[in-house]
Amino acid sequence: MLSDMYKLIPSSDRLLFVDIATPVGTDEVARLSAELSATLKTMAEQIIFVVDWSRAELLPPHVTKAYLTMMRADNPRILRSAFMVSENGLAGQQLERLISEAGNPKRRLFRNRPELETWMQEVTTPGEQQSLRAHLNGNGHK
């Protein structure tokens, strides 16, 4: 765990939960990037990310640029990356743009839990699916 703004929670050798809240600055993104890099060194070559972005708000342009750089650096390691956002809000639209600009079709944004779970079932084991459900439950996603 980095701070109140970020939590990295490895669930298996290839499943990693990332919880993000705002406000954040480029310093926090740099710390997240460093912690993520260290965590990924202990994990499998191809990673399944589940990012809870539902507590994030709009980010200033310099912070989105820092996130974009980090996302592009992770592209080769991604087996799948699902981003959960709140159903309403501009932060989801901003994240959609970031995902598109990062240039990896293995990343997707979800506004509802059932679609995220269905998409992840294609690449996760039953144990990883159970961890996913428990994590989303713990974060209040129905």
Image (cartoon, helix red, strand yellow):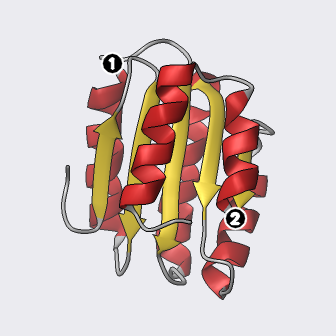
Nearer to us in this view, 120 or 77? 120
Residue at point 29%, 53% (across, down): 7
Q: Could you tell me which residue is drawn at 46 percent across and 28 percent down? A: 15
Disc number placed over residue 41 in the picture, else none: 1
Number of residue marks: 2
Amino acid type assigned to the residue bearing label 1 in the image: Lys
Disc nearer the start of the sequence (2/1): 1
Q: Secondary structure at mark 2?
A: loop
Residue 142 lies in quadrant: bottom right
- Return the x and y of residue 54 as percentages of the image width and height: 51, 71
Residue 133 or residue 56, whichever sits in front: 133
Q: Is residue 97 left or right of residue 19?
A: right
Q: Residues within 10 Å of mark 2 (few under 14, many from 20)?
A: some
Residue 43 vertical placement versus 21 (above, below): above
Determine the CA span between mark 2 and mark 1.
Answer: 31 Å
Q: Where, by quadrant of the figure, is residue 109 drawn?
A: bottom right
Outermost residue on the top side: it is 45
Left or right of 32, for residue 96 = right
Q: Residue at x 45, y 12 (%)?
A: 44
Mark 1, residues whose alpha carbon is within 10 Å: few (<14), some, or many (≥20)?
few
> Which residue appears at 71% of the width and 60% of the height?
110
- In x, y percent, where is residue 3? 18, 62
Residue 86 sits in quarter: bottom right
The amino acid pointed to by label 2 is Asn
Q: Tell which of 101 and 20 is nearer to you.
A: 20
Q: Does 14 sit left or right of 87 as displayed?
A: left
Residue 88 position, x and y percent, is 68, 85
Question: Dot 2 corresponds to which residue?
Answer: 112
The answer to whether residue 16 of the structure is visible from this angle is: yes
Looking at the picture, does residue 73 appear above or below residue 13? below
Q: Regarding mark 1 in the picture, which secondary structure is present there?
A: loop
Residue 70 appears in the picture as rendered: no
